[in-house]
Image: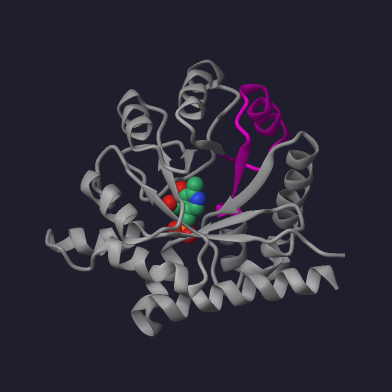
Amino acid sequence: MTLEPLRLGLNIDHVATIRNARGGMHPDPSRAAATARAAGADGLTIHLREDRRHIIDTDMQAVRAASSLPINLEMAATEEMTAIAVAFKPHAACIVPEKREERTTEGGLDVAGLHNSLAPVVRELSEAGCRVSLFIEPDLVQIAVSEVIGAPVVELHTGRYAELWNQGGAEAAADELERIAWASREACKRGLEPHAGHGLTFDNVKPIAAIPQLRELNIGHFLVGEAIFTGLEAAVKRMRSLMDEARAEAAA
Ligand code: PXP
């Protein structure tokens, strides 16, 4: 059996977090963008938050100028962000829930509850040429409503899987892994392309990367943290090779 390739989207938000800690220019997210392709990343992910805590508006063009990789813009479904995305026209736009007080994107989008407000944003982004994805929990209702809304991609939230893995390794995370594998199959059956991300590390990535239906993983915090010890290029290369190994083992 041969599996479709699994893309790696490198999320460079936290390069900007470190830069912003001092308010200067260093480290520059566009420099991270420039090294991503050689290291084996297939795309760049940036999240422009309402409070601009990491990526800021001027980073967007700078990142684009620094790399030929496609850009996935994570964004809340607000008027402000939609206008920015429509003007910027990233390759992809991933709609995420956003709360001011959270440290990171805590749960998936409640696509079912927000259907009426999300549908026009998905339409507007699609008309601007963006491949739209919805960041959701691996849950039947959320997948079914994503299909109705007409987003071509769902990104499955792996945060709970990662948390369980931290508590008790593969065994503790086994049920959640099965839920993500099931949701990936379900998304595919409905014509949606499944992606996954959040909290993925060298330790926990392989079982996720082995899910045959998944087409893209978006990984950031761990890789930027690891870059402190090994450099970004080495960290991304190792993640790439773990993903490739998992894929090859699953296909054998
Ligand atoms: N995917 C989405 C939709 C996210 O919001 C995030 C976090 O910004 C990630 C992937 C990457 O998560 P992490 O930084 O934990 O690797």
Against 59, residue 236 (above or below) is below
User: Residue 156, can we see it?
Assistant: yes
Residue extending farthest bottom: 230
Residue 149 pos. (x, y %): 61, 23
Does the segment drawn in magenta span residue 157? yes
Residue beneath the point at 43% across and 68% down = 36
The image quadrant where one finds the N terminus is bottom right
Residue beneath the point at 46% across and 77% down = 235
Relative placement, left or right, of 129 versus 14 is right
Residue beneath the point at 31% across and 61% down = 66
The image quadrant where one finds the C terminus is bottom right
Highlighted magenta segment, given as a residue range: 135-160
Does the segment drawn in magenta span residue 224? no
Of the pair 61 and 183, the residue shown nearer to us: 61
Residue 195 pos. (x, y %): 62, 49
Of the pair 109 and 130, the residue shown nearer to us: 130
Residue 120 pos. (x, y %): 49, 18
Of the pair 118 and 45, the residue shown nearer to us: 45
Against 134, residue 196 (above or below) is below
Residue beneath the point at 70% across and 69% down = 170
